[in-house]
């Protein structure tokens, strides 16, 4: 997978923000030399919505079922979802059953994390892994049980979140639509803005 370029933002004049993979030498709006002038907003790196799953313990991760967010993803595409253990291993349920061996494919994903801010980090990590292994051991995630519509990656993640018995989180995990509205859509909406900016910049280079 091609590396993600950094996106910069700055502002010089006319209240117009300037975006680019590099900081330009001249203002695209007034052509002034940007090295020798005052900027309304100094350059900063636009934060990427994507993370590498192995660095995001105790989180839920999302990515397109095929391809990757930056170059291939369309709004109507299916998303694949997994659970990251406290050691940074992704547990995912797909047509081959439950798997733990494809963490490397999650290097650019959306991350839902800090799902329970109120607890002690160490005990939460232990509890997270314990629950994850209990749910992963259930018969429901055998290869033969996989069903693209009714028993899929999403079912596995929601079953795990319900098993956590964490008040707000487990409540939303009872219903796929509710869970999406509360936790997934804010992430994909933010990502969509970044993706469209990124592709626009790519098309200009
Ligand atoms: Zn200017």
Image: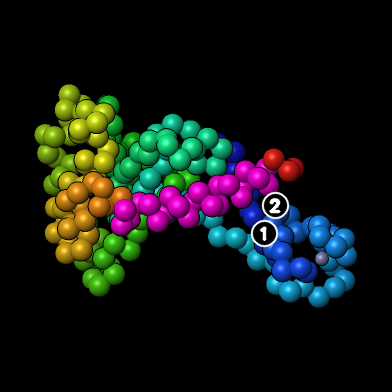
Q: Which residues are magenta?
A: 181-202
Would residue 25 be found to the left or right of residue 58 on screen? right
Mark number, residue 21: 2
Query: Whole-Å distance between the Cαs marked 2 and 1?
Result: 6 Å
Residue displayed at 59% across by 38% down: 2
Would residue 123 be found to the left or right of residue 195 on screen? left
Image quarter hosting the C terminus: top right
Residue displayed at 35% across by 38% down: 80
Res 97 seen here:
no
In the image, residue 101 lies in the stretch drawn in magenta: no
Tell which quarter ligand 1 is in: bottom right
Instruction: Please tell me whether residue 104 is drawn above or below residue 38 in the rendered image.
Output: above
Mark number, residue 8: 1
In the image, residue 187 lies in the stretch drawn in magenta: yes
Q: Secondary structure at mark 2?
A: loop
Query: Main SS of the magenta segment?
Result: helix
Residue 46 lies, in percent from the top left, at: 60, 60
The answer to which of 124 and 77 lies nearer the viewer is 77
User: How many residues crowd around disc 2 within 10 Å: few (fewer than 14), some, or many (20 or more)?
Assistant: some
Residue displayed at 26% across by 29% down: 148
The answer to which of 27 and 63 lies nearer the viewer is 27
Residue displayed at 16% across by 28% down: 145
Res 5 seen here:
yes
User: How many residues crowd around disc 1 within 10 Å: few (fewer than 14), some, or many (20 or more)?
Assistant: some
Residue 117 lies, in percent from the top left, at: 29, 69
The answer to which of 131 and 34 lies nearer the viewer is 34
């Amino acid at each position: 997978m091609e590396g993600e370029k950094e996106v910069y933002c700055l502002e010089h004049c006319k209240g117009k923000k300037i975006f680019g993979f590099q900081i330009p030498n001249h203002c695209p709006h007034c052509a002034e030399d940007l090295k020798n002038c005052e900027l309304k907003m100094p350059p900063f790196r636009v934060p990427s919505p994507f993370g590498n799953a192995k660095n995001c313990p105790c989180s839920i991760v999302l990515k397109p079922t095929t391809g990757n967010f930056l170059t291939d993803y369309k709004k109507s595409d299916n998303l694949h979802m997994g659970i990251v253990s406290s050691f940074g291993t992704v547990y995912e349920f797909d047509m081959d059953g439950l798997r733990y061996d494809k963490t490397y494919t999650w290097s650019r994903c959306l991350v839902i994390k800090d799902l329970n801010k109120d607890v002690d980090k160490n005990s939460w990590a232990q509890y997270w892994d314990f629950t994850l292994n209990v749910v992963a051991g259930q018969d429901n995630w055998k290869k033969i049980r996989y069903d693209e519509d009714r028993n899929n990656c999403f079912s596995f993640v929601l079953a795990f979140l319900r098993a956590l018995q964490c008040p707000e989180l487990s409540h939303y995990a009872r219903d796929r639509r509710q869970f999406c509205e509360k936790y997934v859509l804010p992430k994909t909406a933010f990502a969509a803005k970044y993706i469209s900016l990124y592709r626009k910049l790519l098309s200009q280079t």
